[in-house]
Image: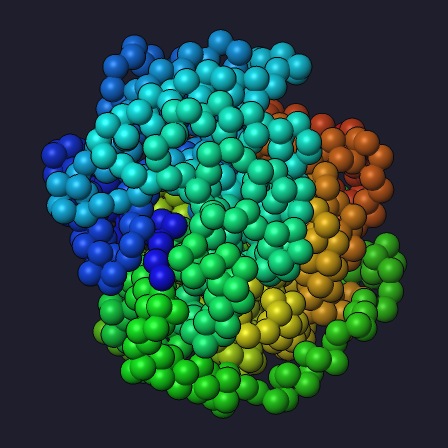
Amino acid sequence: MASHIVGYPRMGPKRELKFALESFWDKKSSAEDLEKVAADLRSSIWKQMADAGTKYIPSNTFSYYDQVLDTTAMLGAVPKRYGWNGGEIGFDTYFSMARGNATLPAMEMTKWFDTNYHFIVPELGPATKFSYSSHKAVSEYKEAKGLGIETIPVLIGPVSYLLLSKPEKGVDKSFSLLSLLGDVLAVYKEVIAELKAAGASWIQFDEPTLVLDLDDSKLQAFSTAYSELESSLSGLDVLIVSYFADVPAEAYKTLIGLKGISGFGFDLVRGTKTLDLIKSAGFPSGKYLFAGVVDGRNIWANDLASSVDTLNALEAIVGKDKLVVSTSCSLMHTAVDLVNETKLDSEIKSWLAFAAQKVLEVNALAKALAGQKDEAFFSANAAAQASRKSSPRVNNEEVQKAAAALKGSDHRRATNVSARLDAQQKKLNLPILPTTTIGSFPQTMDLRRVRREYKANKISEEEYVKAIKEEISKVVKLQEELDIDVLVHGEPERNDMVEYFGEQLSGFAFTANGWVQSYGSRCVKPPIIYGDVSRPKAMTVFWSSMAQSMTSRPMKGMLTGPVTILNWSFVRNDQPRFETCYQIALAIKKEVEDLEAAGITVIQIDEAALREGLPLRKSEHAFYLEWAVHSFRITNCGVQDTTQIHTHMCYSNFNDIIHSIIDMDADVITIENSRSDEKLLSVFREGVKYGAGIGPGVYDIHSPRIPSTEEIADRINKMLAVLEKNILWVNPDCGLKTRKYEEVNPALTNMVSACKLLRKEL
Ligand code: GLN
Ligand code: ZN
């Protein structure tokens, strides 16, 4: 039986590409240096896949920045403003589109489906001229061939490319992106011809949009596109891959009806209904089924025995020689190589598989199905699965019982929000338009050094506490001088809002090199939730009460909410996500109650990533929102009326989930607002009633620009036009961690002045 890998991480096991890119961007190294690092990475990945016995090895899954941007370059669809004059697109134009340059901002970036990867959104219009302008796919194919490795070149499919694009600014509303299909296909034909001439025998089109809710006209575009390509593709075997969810029944029909296609790839990990669909709707005879049984989105070792069962069931339908073992999606969404994890203990390590290990799993499965089972590999895997199931580190009966008791019940604060706000106001006595910030203050080099040295045992706990205390005291004084109403301690003890909590909770593990590309050269290192989550002891009370003791103003306790911790971690796959979320919620609930008992009267529970967890398909939104919002409420349902619960979110795309946000029942919500042309306010303009406190950000903290008093006052006035003055809070968009004090001081000064100006008029 054959094996296939959808795609592979390009950063390198130790983020080699990141460092090469950044050094090139900083002009510390040459383009040749960068190209050398990239070529070495590619060849080692190809060799690794070949050595493992992989039959279908992908090429063109490497990228200097983003695979969608690579496609934009291939199609020559460079927005006019970048001043490109034709010819092969080089680093200059490519990185200007990706990152902006001295005079131009970058193109927009957005989330790649429900992953934490971000792609560069193509901007297209009726005047966009397409021309074959990057030969990367062909040169990578040839490069592998030169190394003696036959690969299957991967292209983003033409329909998904268009569906992921946006109309360029100023284009008429009636313009349809799919109207560009013919022009785009003309370039694909050239690429295909060149790949054929270079000797390719297979070609892979990634069409992940097939898993979305698509209407008939969009589905029709797939039929149109592949009919149009049919004659160019003749002589080639063509694979279409979908991933991240089930292909809906209608789309499945369209897909298997496409002409000239030899194989179809499905995500059998997230696509739990695919097997049934194949059974009920049938699978075209003589075609290959690429079965994505090895999870590209997580870090768990595959349950090989159970995969063998799935593969056997599929084999009975499609036949032995037509089944190919594959990954559920590109492995770029998982960590790179477990070999570099020297600090993880061997038990936990035995439960894991990163990209390099997943390549071995895919091939071990293929061999087993072909009757050449590697007994040692399979029995080690079975032993690891068994130890994971029974390990006392995974199972905590008390936690399981407590979480199980939450299901089907509801948790709400006893009193309604307006009565609570009255009770809180009596206690807090805040002015109208109260000011606050989101939590973090600038993280200086000194601060990072202190934390690093403490972690490495280079400074004592006493020295560490002293340094952090000094920092908190500085931040408190500054806020008092600025005359901010509700203070924060500045989060100097945290390097990351999830890691900080994960490190103190049981059930979490941390890797040294488990990086996953987020965008460009940026990577994140998600914690691994492997077991039942509990909180051995208070996590933030020490610092928060210290900070509160420094001021008579209210000091916000600062926590990360359960949904955000969940969505920014590698989550266990042996129980539903909501169960893990409930467990985290219970741990955070204890922290909330300890903070309250320690005299903290305002507690902020950040849910920065609540929206990110929304499933790809609308039919699944309600269920997710129900348990996510419930989890949030669990954390604070038990506090007194006079304890004020804040939450914070870093996006303003609320229109579709506003009722869930209201249902979170926080006393005050602070939200990003300024980058999105006040999209948020339009929700309220349209008549949604909001009775709790709300602080739409009054300036963008992502930019070094300092907003003037007038500008902020103007923003607040716009808010006052749609929101009642007694519920409005004034705050920046998000935390100030990435800014410098030279920016923060004047910006906050202007923010408070704007408030004071307006208070006089109200
Ligand atoms: N409290 C966090 C901070 O201010 C919130 C960060 C976030 O929303 N991403 O840094
Ligand atoms: Zn934020």
Colouring used for the render: rainbow
Q: In this view, does 272 lie above or below 442?
A: below
Left or right: residue 321 versus residue 142 is right
* 556 over 408 or under it: above or below: above
Provide residue 99's location: percent of width, then percent of height.
Answer: 35, 31
- The quarter of the rendered structure image containing the N terminus is bottom left
Quadrant showing the C terminus: top right
Based on the displayed image, in which of its 4 quarters is residue 582 positioned? bottom right
Q: Which residue is drawn at 55% across and 74% down?
A: 574
Image coordinates of residue 239 in percent, x first then y, are 42, 42
> Which residue does the image show at 50% across and 72% down from the upper left?
309
Relative placement, left or right, of 505 versus 353 is right
From where the camera sits, is residue 734 visible?
no
Q: Position of residue 77 (x, y in %)?
A: 40, 19
Quarter of the image holding residue 217? top right
Question: Image height check: is 556 above or below 537?
Answer: above
Does the rendering let one see residue 381?
yes
Pick the front one: 427 or 519: 519
Vertical order, 286 against 196 (above or below): below
Looking at the picture, how far across and down is residue 730, in whole percent? Answer: 65, 42
In the displayed structure image, the side of residue 387 where residue 631 appears, left or right: right
Q: Residue at (20%, 61%) from the top-left corner?
A: 51
